[in-house]
Amino acid sequence: MKIKSNIFSLSRFFKLLQHDFNNNRLYYLAIIPVAMLAIGLVHWFNYPDAGLPQINYSYRPWESKRYLPTFILGYIVFGIIIGGNSFPGLKNNNSTIRYLSLPASVFEKFLFQWGTRILLFLILYPLIFKLTVNFTADIYLDHLASILVSEGKSLDLLPKIDYLIYSEYFGKNSEPILLLFLFLLMGIGGISLMFLGGTIFRKWNILLGPITILFLVFVFFLHLVILSHFLVPESTEGWEINFKIGGPEIIKDLPLPILSGFVFLGLLSIVSWVVAYLRLKEREA
Amino acid sequence: MILLERMSFAYRKRTPLFDQMDWEVHPGQVIGLLGKNGAGKSTLLRLLSGILKPHSGSININGYTPFDRSPLFLEELILLPEENILQERTSMKQYAKSMASFYPGFDHNKLDTLLDEFSLPRDKKLGKLSYGQRKKFLIAFALSSNCKLLLLDEPTNGLDIPSKSLFRKLITANIQEDQTIIISTHQVKDVENLIDRVVMVDNGKVIFDENLLKISDDWYFGFGSLLPEDQVYFEKGMGSYHYIKPFSPDLNPSQVSLELLFNAVTSGQLVQPKTINA
């Protein structure tokens, strides 16, 4: 006789997936094309010589590293949209009753949300971003080439637009890698807080989640400013932060402040997930 | 089996709604949970379904604690709340497709039959249905699930008169031996001829809990121009009286008037000898 688990069953998880897709079909089908379109359009208008048909040849080549600002901006925007929509079943009282009485375990419901809102987002966003910008670059260059050909000009005049290659972001020194990991953990921490916000702010999460994160960032910044006033009062004025982040290396090439940043952000994410699970478990309607 | 032991519950910043409540329900009954508005009927159903957590005491249903929300417990329970919990953009077909798989005993043929009985259009979006039609759909879904426990909160609200009698007919026709149905309502007439046990709640307490057969064995529900001396409760109608008096062997058994019984109990004029939750 097959014994069903109280905590996790693959068949129930699959049913949950089907159920969620049936109820949010439009959202799932639209989010990736909309994201690709938005990313593509932003780059189309930012690549060199976008002011067609007068091509300005005094351009700055578009190197792989120039994708970073839009990558971060896109992460924040889509992170807010996707993370902000965590636990859609808890949006209002009626949907909460429906969601809580759905025959799946709390762990399955949590895992599904965690998987689609955090894990899948962290995997898919960089892939979709890369695919979109590189594809946009190809179309864009083809478009410019057709203009040059129509004007009888040499294709040598085409601007240089590099593909996005993530490995180029990792320098040879360990410090940029560490900072990059710190940024990565910040990103995970941010989306994790938005995920947790889904269990607290419900339908207002998309608005109140980012405000809360901004507030937390402000509190952290304020903490550094105050520290700066205490540590180097002679060179700190107003909102400046003037003390250097260096300090003892705990492991080779890993300064203590960066290590503590890793620990803090790592814990922030894990605590957000655990609290989200517990809030879902204790949710009433 | 449902077992409540010294169960207490209060909404935040409000006076306790249930205080040390004891209650027992054996499988295979259709229970009418009656009470005035705000008596705690819906809250009790939510506590039984694990949507709310008791502050103290315990609730045990077939070995499960509802608030643990075990999937094995939830797949044998359907809660039909009074509010509209259906998603507007989904059709009945899509709803049934995505929800039915969670209930192991779900019978699609039964759903088809019941939807036909209620004359419901399958492809219409749930948001386009009237309140009554949504209720009918949820009733049909609940009956088709073959769950062991059906908790129906005000199921006849929004139903027209033919649908109310159809509801009674369909419940009677589709109930299984091991199924327990708890129907909460303040429209007591709607569940007449349907339930086999009456439970009345008031101020968070069970003030009356009895089988209908026992009620008709103990009480006589009469109607006449003269009031009998031994009546315990009466209501004056158009030149006549509806009354309740103790049953005696010289009388023929009468049809229980739930409305009269409800009014008699809630007004304190008919007190059950053995109080369930004193």
Image: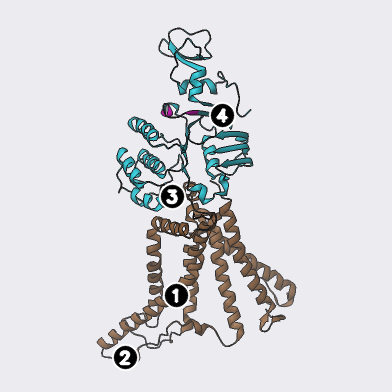
Residue A127: numbered disc: 1
Q: Give the labeled residue for mark 2.
A: A155
Q: Is residue A80 visible?
A: no
Residue type, label 3: Pro
The span from disc 4 to disc 3 (Cα, nearest Å) is 36 Å
Give the letter of the chain under mark 4: B
Q: Decide: few, some or many residues near mark 2? Use Cα within 10 Å; few <14, some 14-19, many ≥20.
A: few
* Earlier residue among tags 1 and 2: 1
Above or below for A276 versus B229: below
Q: Give the labeled residue for mark 3.
A: B104
Chain the render paints brown: A
Report which quarter residue A201 is drawn in: bottom right
Q: Residue at x 57, y 53 (%)?
A: A281
The span from disc 2 to disc 4 (Cα, nearest Å) is 86 Å
Above or below for B162 versus A4: above
Q: Decide: few, some or many residues near mark 4? Use Cα within 10 Å; few <14, some 14-19, many ≥20.
A: many
Camera-near label (1 vs 2) is 1
The x, y position of residue A140, in whole percent, is: 34, 80
Chain the render paints cyan: B
Judge from the rendering whether residue A252 lies leftward or rightward of residue A104; answer left or right.
right
Number of callouts: 4
Q: Give the labeled residue for mark 4.
A: B202
Q: Is residue B81 visible?
A: yes
Residue type, label 4: Asp
Segment colored magenta: B190-197
**Main SS, magenta residues:** loop
Q: Is mark 1 in CB contact (under 8 Å) with mark 2?
A: no
Residue type, label 2: Leu
The span from disc 1 to disc 4 (Cα, nearest Å) is 60 Å
* Earlier residue among tags 4 and 3: 3
Q: Decide: few, some or many residues near mark 1? Use Cα within 10 Å; few <14, some 14-19, many ≥20.
A: few
